Amino acid sequence: MFVRNAWYCAGWDEAVGIGANDLVVRQIAGRSILLYRTGEGRLVAMEDRCPHRSAPLSLGRKEGDAIRCMYHGMLFGPDGACRQVPGMDRIPEGAVAATLPVVEKDNWIWVWLGDPARADPELICFAIGPSDPDWVLRTSHLRVDTGYREEIANLADLSHVSWVHGLTFAGSDDWGYIKPRHRLNPRGIETRYCVRGVPAPAFARHLFADDARFDINVHVRMTVPCNFILSFAVHEAEAGGAPNEPSRGKLLLDTFSSQAVTPRDAGSVDYYFSWGTSRETNFPGIVDLMHRTNMDAFLEDKRILEGQRARLLQYPGAPQVDIVHDAGPGRMLWVLDQLLAEEAAEAGAA
Amino acid sequence: MFVRNAWYCAGWDEAVGIGANDLVVRQIAGRSILLYRTGEGRLVAMEDRCPHRSAPLSLGRKEGDAIRCMYHGMLFGPDGACRQVPGMDRIPEGAVAATLPVVEKDNWIWVWLGDPARADPELICFAIGPSDPDWVLRTSHLRVDTGYREEIANLADLSHVSWVHGLTFAGSDDWGYIKPRHRLNPRGIETRYCVRGVPAPAFARHLFADDARFDINVHVRMTVPCNFILSFAVHEAEAGGAPNEPSRGKLLLDTFSSQAVTPRDAGSVDYYFSWGTSRETNFPGIVDLMHRTNMDAFLEDKRILEGQRARLLQYPGAPQVDIVHDAGPGRMLWVLDQLLAEEAAEAGAA
Amino acid sequence: MFVRNAWYCAGWDEAVGIGANDLVVRQIAGRSILLYRTGEGRLVAMEDRCPHRSAPLSLGRKEGDAIRCMYHGMLFGPDGACRQVPGMDRIPEGAVAATLPVVEKDNWIWVWLGDPARADPELICFAIGPSDPDWVLRTSHLRVDTGYREEIANLADLSHVSWVHGLTFAGSDDWGYIKPRHRLNPRGIETRYCVRGVPAPAFARHLFADDARFDINVHVRMTVPCNFILSFAVHEAEAGGAPNEPSRGKLLLDTFSSQAVTPRDAGSVDYYFSWGTSRETNFPGIVDLMHRTNMDAFLEDKRILEGQRARLLQYPGAPQVDIVHDAGPGRMLWVLDQLLAEEAAEAGAA
């Protein structure tokens, strides 16, 4: 159900401080992962389960770079090895807390769920973090009770913008008619297109003349499990351009959004996202407005995704009809299913 | 578990208006049914599930007589056929939302879950609606977490009135001793009897002298799934009448109650009910008093039915002892089980 | 999963009064047990389920020594036999509510779940109740969402006191190093040891000089399902004593705690407990302080036990490492498993 050999986003780096009480637990792909920082600030990711009797280590006590389980006092180093069992001279075999490769990149924390030997940081998806000096970005988090496959289908097809986001992102039903081409990558898809001659989106309508028209250059990079990296550049509308060629109209607002959707379990996800403008095209108030709009819009998604999930559970196995807009979701889910099949084959051979 | 070829009550007609936001969802026998009215007021019943990716159509937008799914913009007519897929010239095969026969009668909305060809409105149970000019009736709704078989057993045996409704409907334990005869009908049972010489019921005790005694002529018509239509006429007590003959004492108060219990799923029901008097025997304040008492009494049922359900789930398969008062429930459940068996046999043959 | 032939604590005697509304239901080992007192105050324990259609008898009406089911009026005596079915001359066969042997002892109510012929009151665990004139004891109750095997493991090893109860019972990590010997009994274990030279516990630190040191003589008697009877005597520290010999330092505070943990079902328990001092060593305010501390400390247990349960459910079948402190839990669970295996063998032979 979940790819094991993949980096999963465990949230924004600032969520895990170096204080004594900064023991953060993330639910990732059915597992509970404890995150904490050593005294020097180095991040540790450990299964939140004492190997003795399964007490949560997150109810424990940080001691330097180690964590003590506060049920029976066993002390585990950042490598997961048990350093002390109070009352025993010898550490029993198997007294090891599982640890996971963990990397900080672009202000996100990434953990690797599978074979540590394959945990190549180069596989972490491209993103732009809020500390990047060229961008003015604000971040948020939302929990959605849906499967991550449904999130993939949501994000890999932006035709839904017209219908779901009519009060926020969309300014017309033009998004409903886009037909982008998607390029397959080993761990995802990449999509570029231009939505041409559209009015200002609902959230920014008041900033422009009623008859102002725009071209929007969209560049999406998606990777497993469900990371969605979006360049969204607003240009003055140019005449006669094709939807699959970028607009060469004057660049008005260059925006960027990094979104990571991490499955918590079969029926819920954590959604970590940012949005903002390049420093060059930024102007007062616009990023605040985008930030509020972003949360509003993702609550619109949450409503439809959670409604969809209710019906999927209520009508298991009901037939589904495909439409033209399933091209993106279909490709991204195909990439995911290939990786799942590979891992299943490996597990079968082992 | 549920009869398919039957009319199920989907509530009072006034609950579904003609406004843009009047998209009402009912849970019926495990399905979610969207109800809406076209611009002309005609009622449409449609499975609340887009055939594309299962988003609830009730989160959609009414457009004239059609409903647009607000996930990807597909538009469905009142016959369920897809009229438009934004971005496609051709409507894909299978792009049909399931619709159900729907009828309004006696201020109730009725939907037919099974084969539309058999949806004979003559099969809708007899009732008297609140708009009937000869009656003064008030309506209510209650949800109860119980199975509808347990509701059948509750309603098909009024001996429980003495014990469950001692503070409301009952004035003595006389109901506990009734032994009515039940007539089998193709889709239910019919029961007539007279409870004789009883004091005023608890809720109306203050209206009468302490030694006043009454005869109550009861006429019950039950039909599948669990509709309970009750004529309940209070007469002056006459001497010497038999319980299986109607009283000929002077008619004091002629009351009527239409009750439809619709299974939502295996463990909950929607209960739609009315109660009131004939216009001829009505007097000021009595219907208000009956209305309040009715809700109080059905909350008494809810308490015992939900307690019973907890124990049925806790002690699955525990033996049950039968008593004389199971005659009515037994007959009504026999009728239901016959219909279920017929449908199972048909499904097996198909 | 649960031993049948055992006494289960159903709470403090004062919880069941003789009033008309004193119908108390306890969830014990997956069953719902109704407790009530006859007019003379004699306690009755009866399955909370009418043998007719499973309505809870606890929604019924007490009539002298009998209970009437308020669904259809069946009346059951304290032996469970049906005395009346309104409307029937004959009582149907099988119209019997299951009753259970019930005993009051040391202010606790005990019910026997198995074969009544084996319900020997001598098997009820030793305890000291709050009405004992030699002791000043206060009582409490707590619900914990954990299995009773996890409660056994918690209570049969007091090394956890140092880690879980650092803010309440513990004054140092000395408890983490105890190595008591446990004696096997037919229905439990018995454990004696002395924790020597320890500072005052956190909750009483303010009552003593900082350098005061104490010996604590501990005597634990555990019995199935999970009763924990504790003598905990605080002495002046003596020099040179062994941990497995009782301290002979001057007795400062003689305390006693009776604790019964009753499984409600697979995932929750009712915890009934008392704590206090002997009348001889009591002094003003100390029992109030102990009472508050006891609840605080058991909330500390609740937090770790419920965290543990979440992880056990999340990681079913995950390997566990044993440590030295599992000796007590291992022995007590061995006793329990022997009894379970005996009952399974009997059930198989029958």
Image: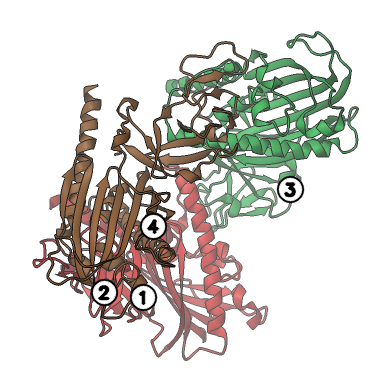
Chain colours: A green, B brown, C red
Q: Is residue B247 above or below residue C204?
A: above
What secondary structure is found at the residue carrying circle 3? loop
Give the mark nearer the N terminus: 2 vs 1. Answer: 2
Image coords of residue C120 (percent x, y): 21, 73
Chain holding disc 4: C
Q: Is residue A210 above or below residue C51?
A: above
Chain holding disc 3: A
Chain holding disc 1: B
Residue placed most toward the observer, C176 or B67: B67
Mark 1 or mark 4, which is nearer to you? Answer: 1
Three-letter amino acid code of the residue under disc 3: Gly
Q: How far apart in space, not on screen, are marks 2 and 3 (Cα)?
A: 75 Å
Q: Residue furthest left?
A: C90
Residue A262, located in which quarter of the rendered image?
A: top right
Three-letter amino acid code of the residue under disc 4: Arg
> How many numbered marks appear?
4
Residue carrying label 2? B199
Residue carrying label 4? C149
Residue C292 visible? The answer is yes
What secondary structure is found at the residue carrying circle 4? helix
> In the image, are marks 2 and 1 on the same chain?
yes
Mark 2 or mark 1, which is nearer to you? Answer: 1
| Numbered mark located on residue B207 in the image | 1
Q: How far apart in space, not on screen, are marks 2 and 4 (Cα)?
A: 57 Å
Image coords of residue B97 (percent x, y): 47, 25
Residue carrying label 3? A17
Three-letter amino acid code of the residue under disc 1: Leu
**Marks 1 and 4 close (CB-CB < 8 Å):** no
Q: Residue at x 68, y 31 (%)?
A: A165
